[in-house]
Image (cartoon, rainbow, N blue to C red):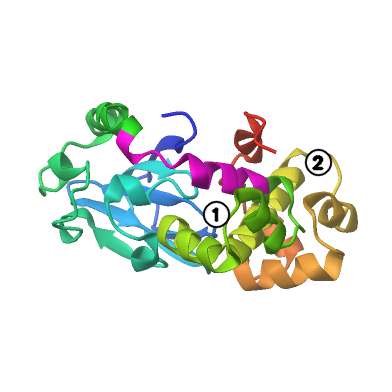
Amino acid sequence: MAGRVVCAWTHFADSTNAGFAQPVYPDGCVDLLWRDDDELVVVGAMTRPMQAALRPGLRLTGVRLAPGQAAGLLGIPLSELRDREVALREIAGRGTFLEPLRQRQAPAGEELLERLQALFARAACEAADPWMRTAVRWLARRPSARLKDLAAHLEVSERQLNRRFAAAAGYGPKLLQRVLRFQSFLNLAAQSAKMDLAGLALEAGYSDQAHMNRDCRELAGRTPLRLLADAHPALGMSDLFNTDLS
């Protein structure tokens, strides 16, 4: 599953405390999500922040798919899921490899993760998209690069580049570049010993701090200082650099 799955995760909300809303920010990823005894849902790539309501006693199990790697597994263009949460049973008749998990009484917790791992392993060859993996890594390494240079590197037209990204990642390469740069900023801030916003902005690939401020407001709905008080990087940016694909 290397290169297609960012992580598998579980969350347990304390049943003795009141529920709360967890802020979630764009990361270019797609999540397969299971809530308690409810059905499996797919959360598409996001372009804006959202608040996830977590009620007391809630148990969540999730698998986070890397940018550009969910379309082949789900059997649909990711543009259809942008900023949406859709029950897996509604993604019907598409030949998805997740067919065994469509029913409402699918397994949960560790059993669900084991089933998903087995399904991923079986689908590894036919559903992989090395073209998108190369493109995403190229963007992550070059946060201020021009898209025409990416198109030239991949030997496609800019029109084809935008079309393929919309289908495989949910939106165009320019927006994904912004999301990856935003996540890089969060990643750098989490590792930094001091809060030098101007320095973090330049290291993440922004032209200046004002540029970073605008992106934080648009992608997270708050200023960098307020954001860093409770936000954590969802995407380990080092995961995008494991293989030299420059």
Mark toward the start of the polypeptide (2 vs 1): 1
Q: Is residue 127 magenta?
A: yes
- Where are the magenta residues, as a range? 126-138
Residue at mark 2: 192
Residue 102 in view of the camera = yes
What's the residue type where badge 1 is placed? Asp
Identify the element where label 2 is drawn.
loop
Relative to 160, residue 244 above or below: above
Whole-percent x, y for residue 19 in the image: 39, 58
Front: mark 2 or 1: 1
- Picture quarter with the C terminus: top right
Amino acid type, label 2: Ser
The dot on residue 27 is 1
Q: Tell me which corner region of the image, top left, top right, bottom left or bottom right, holds residue 105.
A: top left
Please rate how many residues cluster around mark 1, counting C-alpha atoms within 10 Å: few if below 14, some from 14 to 19, many from 20.
Answer: many
Residue lying at 30% horizontally and 28% vertically, measured from the top left:
117
Name the residue nearer the viewer: 100 or 219: 100
